[in-house]
Image: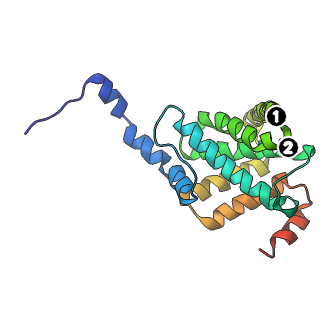
Amino acid sequence: MTVLIPNKKVAARWNGALETRLRHAPLESFLRSRGRKWVLSGEARVSDNLACATIYFVDQALTACTPDGNGVLDATHHAAVGQAACAVSHGLALLIQEANSWRIAALIGTARILAAHIGPDAAAHLSATCARDYAKGLKTGLESGLLQISTVVAGAVESNNEALAGKALQLISQRISPVPSGALARRAAPL
């Protein structure tokens, strides 16, 4: 019988790899179950997967809450989209124990979602503003609506539960909705 002992470089790479992989598994499983791209390796794996999930949730909610389901909002709601993206990415980053990765995912997610509506430069600028404002809220206390979005999204991804995912989409829709929440509920009821 031979015992293989890896060199220091290989041992350092393996150290903690299983724990990290297990922490990230719920997010990857959620993305896979919804036919979304997910990344298993590479330097940007965490932020790419978080951004993909953020875009999934906010895009779905945006389509659900806009007239005719066309996903187009007026300028007064763009910041709400960015704040919702920050809440989603923050909740998911906490779930997979990568707390410092929420900002990159929120920046990417917000910019990609809003680029089609306001152009890439304005989307990037608004994305940075929303992330900065959200980070300030983390220090002073998040608004309850954003905190609830973070919590419900994390629960939905962790359990890969359709009902919780639907609740998360409803919360995000209410946050970014251009129509009063009562009208949104009436519009969503027939579905």
Q: What's the residue at 61%, 52% (across, down)?
A: 154
Image height check: is 2 above or below 185?
Answer: above
Numbered circle sitting on residue 162: none
Residue 46 appears left or right of 19:
right
In the displayed structure, would residue 186 be above or below residue 54? below
**Which residue is found at the position 30% from the left and 29% from the top?**
11
Residue 156 shows in this picture: yes
Looking at this view, is 122 or 163 the one in front?
A: 122
Q: In whole angstroms, how far apart are the C-alphas of marks 2 and 1?
A: 8 Å
Q: Nearer the viewer, residue 153 or 119?
A: 119
Residue 69 locus on image (x, y percent): 82, 61
Q: In the orientation shown, which residue stands out farthest toward the left?
A: 1
Q: Quadrant of residue 60?
A: bottom right
Amino acid type, label 1: Leu
Q: Quadrant of the C terminus?
A: bottom right
Local crowd size for mark 2, using a 10 Å CA cut-off: few (<14), some (14–19), many (≥20): many
Element carrying mark 1? helix
Task: Please name the residue shown 58% across and 39% down the image.
Answer: 48
Q: Amino acid at mark 2?
A: His
- The reply, left or right, for residue 165 in relation to residue 5 is right
Residue 138, given in percent of the width and then of the height, sits at 72, 37
